[in-house]
Amino acid sequence: MARKRSLRSNGHQPVSPEFRKPAGPVRRRRIVYIAGYDPRPPEGTTYDLLKRELARYCEARPLRFDLSSVTHAPDGETASWTLALEAEGWRCEAEYLFLRWDDIVAKDFARGFPERVLRCIPALIDYFASGLYSRMRRAFHRAVLLWLYPFVAIAGIFLLAITAGLWVAEQFSGAFGKGVAGMAVFLAIAAAGAWLTRHTFIQHLADLWCFLRDFGIGRRPDMEARCERFANYVLDAVRRDDADETILVGHSYGTMMIIEAVARALDRDEAAFSSGAPVSALTLGSCINTSTLHPRSGARKAAVRRVAETKRVLWAEIQGRQDMINYYRDDPGVAAGLPDDDDRANPVVRTFSLREVLAKTTYNRFSMNYFRMHFQTICANDESHPWDYFLAVAGPDPLADRLSLAYWAERRKNADYFLRQSVPVLAAFPNLPQTPSI
């Protein structure tokens, strides 16, 4: 018999009125952003993607945007820029603070192929021996298909190199000839395999799955130290009162990092989250569970529980059905040991199909590009939808209102009208029930 899912896991839990939200339209918003596991600086990833997708988004709508250049902090740990989005009747400016850990990822990527193989072997064994693989499969079976890909590919390259080397060695007589020929073939195939892994997503995914497991069980002191500093930046942001709203955003495995930073900041100064602008945490394309499902991931579980149980921060989880890297229709609090019920206010889960936001031709073009689908939650929509990244970070509506069940239900009840609203701000839906601000 199938387990009955909570309203939260199904994406139907209302936003608690206990969360603070701006009293009026948002004119200035502060964004603290942590990207996923990527060795590139923001100009090569998040910022360039934002610039390209904003241009595509505004070209099809009566909107104007202004995006500043990137400013890097002297210590290289943060970058910043501003985004202004404007339409008739409103303008909102978003101040981005990008928290960097690409230097840590770049060190992982710099490993040679033999070291990568030796690192993958214990990680792979532990995924199975600890039960993590089985728990991942039960939580969201499609994520496991992508998980298997790099390990199978690397094992295949390694076995092919050994087999070919042994076969070629047998064609020669004499121990010296056998050894030289066999080793030459082994090294040639291994070198070709190493090149292949670097120029496909094999290396990226292999390093990612190893990192997720290592950080999950507390074996990445470099990342632990970085999260401590991330918490400092979060506290600085929430203490300021020069914005109408603060949103702490994580994408991909940046979701675990933003939750870690928020949890540590709450432990240091919980009152700070009520002193400035209303604060929300927004996790997109989340793969938090890959760390918290490990039986030895006590610290990661504690961080998730800390944020899930607070009422000082609204935590929103946005999950796309065709995103094979995120966990779909999932409450991260359950993997962290909390009951699967509707008593908690956090996280507020909202689910949707990527088919709903992409034109048919766009969807068909990207449907087999798993990384592109994974990034859709931070890309431009073709169709109007309640989930709209650019309106969430630089639109006039408080995030809590954009998450309201009534607003999301409007897309289903009055789809034709919703789709005709090229800029679906809440003012376009005057009959929606209003929730009070506190």
Image (cartoon, grey):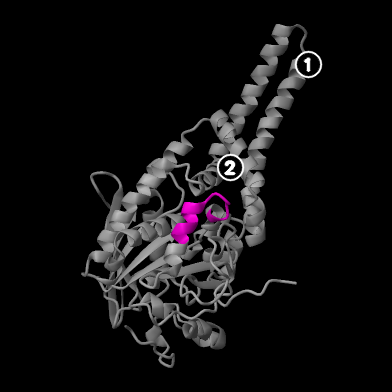
Apparent side of residue 247 relative to residue 297 in the rendered image (left or right): left
Say the numbered circle drawn on residue 170.
1
- What element does badge 1 sit on? helix
Q: Residue at x 46, y 75 (%)?
A: 345
Q: Position of residue 18 (x, y in %)?
A: 38, 80
Looking at the rendered image, the quarter that the C terminus falls into is bottom left
What crowding class fits label 1: few (fewer than 14 Cα within 10 Å), some (14-19), or many (20 or more)? some
The part of the chain drawn in magenta is: 292-304
**Picture quadrant where residue 240 is located:** bottom left
Say the numbered circle drawn on residue 202.
2
Which residue type carries mark 1? Glu
Q: Residue at x 50, y 63 (%)?
A: 376
> Where 97 sits versus 276, above or below?
above
Q: Position of residue 342 (x, y in %)?
A: 53, 77
Which residue type carries mark 2? Ile
Say the numbered circle drawn on residue 182.
none
Instruction: Work out whether residue 345 can be spotted.
Output: yes
